[in-house]
Amino acid sequence: MIGKRIFVLRVFFFASMVSRFQIAAFVLLALSLLLLPQAGNALPFFDNLPKFKIRVSEDRELQDWLKDQVKEQRKSSSVLKAYEDPLDVARYERGTLEKLLRSRGYYDGRVRQSVTDGEILYRVVPGPLYRIKSLEVNMPPHLKSGFPGVGLREGEPLEAEKVTEGVKRIENYLAENACLLNVDVDYQATVIHSEHAARLEYRVAQSPEVNIGQVYVEGVTTVDEDFLRKRLKLEPGDCFSRGKMDAAKLRLLRTNLIAGVNAEVSEPSAGIVDITFLVIERKHRTIRLGVGYTSDEGAGVSAGWEHRNILGRGEKIEVETRVNEVKQSLKTELLVPRFFRDDQDFSAKAEASNEERDSYEARSVTIGGIISRRHTKHRTFSVGSELKFSKVQEEGEQSENYNLLSFPLGLKIDTTDNLLDAHKGATVALEVKPYFDLRGSGTRFVKNTLVATGYLTAEETRFDPTLAVRIKAGVISGIDNLDIPADERFYAGGGGSVRGYAYQALGPRRLIPSTVPGEPPTLSDPIGGRALSEVSFEGRFRFTETWGGVLFLDGGNAYADPQPSFNDLYWGVGLGVRYMTSFAPLRFDIAFPLDRRDDLDDSSYQIYVSLGQAF
């Protein structure tokens, strides 16, 4: 195998009946194990640090802040975890509390500790608050005239965080308003104990002011050099700035064509400096080979080839084929970044597939293209066209041919911090996709899909618990349910939908009359619907740097009428384990259906193994 290898394996196991009461009891037990208070060595993942209290007379705000800081230190300090005697812990944390007091301006603060029944009590006497007696900023006079200040004034408390923030304010101001070859800012705080005060002085080191001369790019072999130069956005005669140079390096890395970049600045001559960017190109080709097995698709193999610089300007072409017992596909996709604009991409695809599901068989060839534009940092609009030639045959029906032309319109808002393992932020993705059959059959419909996710993490709480929520709704309007091609209808159930139920197992079915007189009719396989409703809740926990756990609840259903409802859902519940790799979490989930349908042979539980979080 060459290049990146990503294996996604979803395996389903079936066992004997498990009642809803047994399932609920099992999940409640798992939840209680996660939320129980510390119990010595009885439970894994819990440390043995003694409980503590902090008492600060007449200053509740300072007391709460010190308590939070100690809790944060306990989460990350390897030194504390090595102590077994509470007295050793108390002495170590007393030093921490004294440093924290000084950082808030209490230079005469005293901390006393006592240990009773294994619990530590810290009594804190902060003493007088030291304030700034004088404040001075030393920088060249022609720059100082427009400087807005460091955010501190005489008479304010001498707090370390605000003092260092003043250094950043000066550096940012100089980066935007000066052409200094080097920006070096430091400060000196002179404490006057007799006056409970301090003198604060910021100093800017002397440095010549220069402009940019020539800009060179070295190390390029296959990437278009002019393309990289445009990404730099540095021109001869521009005011020199280390911040601009760092931003230029970041833009080179964001092309995904460069593995590393350094910048060298020449010695100034007549107020001019030359800049040389030394780049290391990434490997642009990847070959992927893989094998796998899923219960709904059987054994299969996949192969892919990717070139991320096919035309020298970051254009990516990808060819991938997948073959298994129920689906065979060959797909080619071309991505052109910065398509006529830096904030715009173009992608084109061509795909041929053959699919044999329980409820339908479909053969199709699809070609299309989409233009995506980043309106803001978090908002992207897209518009495109797609032509799909398909032959679809439903169970017990004659095959139908379609030449579907569609014009997908999309909007995506993404404020999450990580694509594959988000801890905070939210996403909203809306797609409106009108379809027209060019064969003149009169088949016209509009497929609308809305997916929203949200993530909230209590970072200062043990195990960094994350609440993750996903809501998905879809509506197809324009024609009756059975007039829509079967492979375009909505289905629910499976690892990416409602865990605990088989893939596409939820949704409307048809009654099939019995061929034996007197016997009742049976239900067909799912036929799909014109509406979809799904909702998922996950509680994610991080026990160590590499291990985590999840409790989840999924609900969903598909409907023949285009009226999605969140009141008539099938629910599945479960728990899982996460192993954090350098790329994405590897997840192992076990899920139980809470609305098991005995007449449809729903399994009592299912297991999912995959790469990346469920959503």
Image: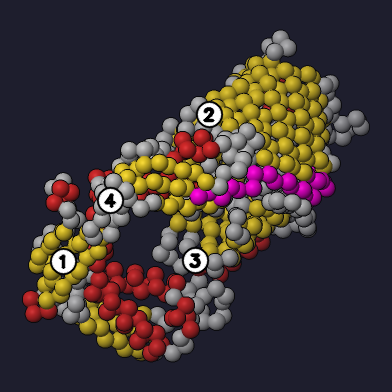
Numbered label attached to residue 339: 2
Front-most of residues 64 and 230: 230
Residue 321 vertical position relative to residue 425 in the rendered view, above or below: above
Q: Which residue is mark 1?
A: 200
Asked whether the viewer can see residue 54, the reply is no
Mark 1: few, some, or many residues within 10 Å (few <14, many ≥20)? many
Query: What span is in magenta?
Result: 278-302
Secondary element under disc 1, as helix, strand or loop, is strand
Task: State the separation of the CA atoms marked 3 and 1.
Answer: 40 Å
Rounded to the nearest angstrom, the CA distance separating label 4 from label 3 is 46 Å
Residue under the image location 78 percent in, 58 percent down: 16
Select label 4 or label 2 by which is in front. Answer: 4
Label 4's element?
Answer: loop
Q: Are marks 4 and 3 in contact (CB under 8 Å)?
A: no
Q: Which mark is residue 180?
A: 4
Find the distance from the CA under tag 2 to the CA under tag 1: 52 Å
Crowding at dot 4, Cα within 10 Å, few <14 / some 14-19 / many 20+, comes out as some
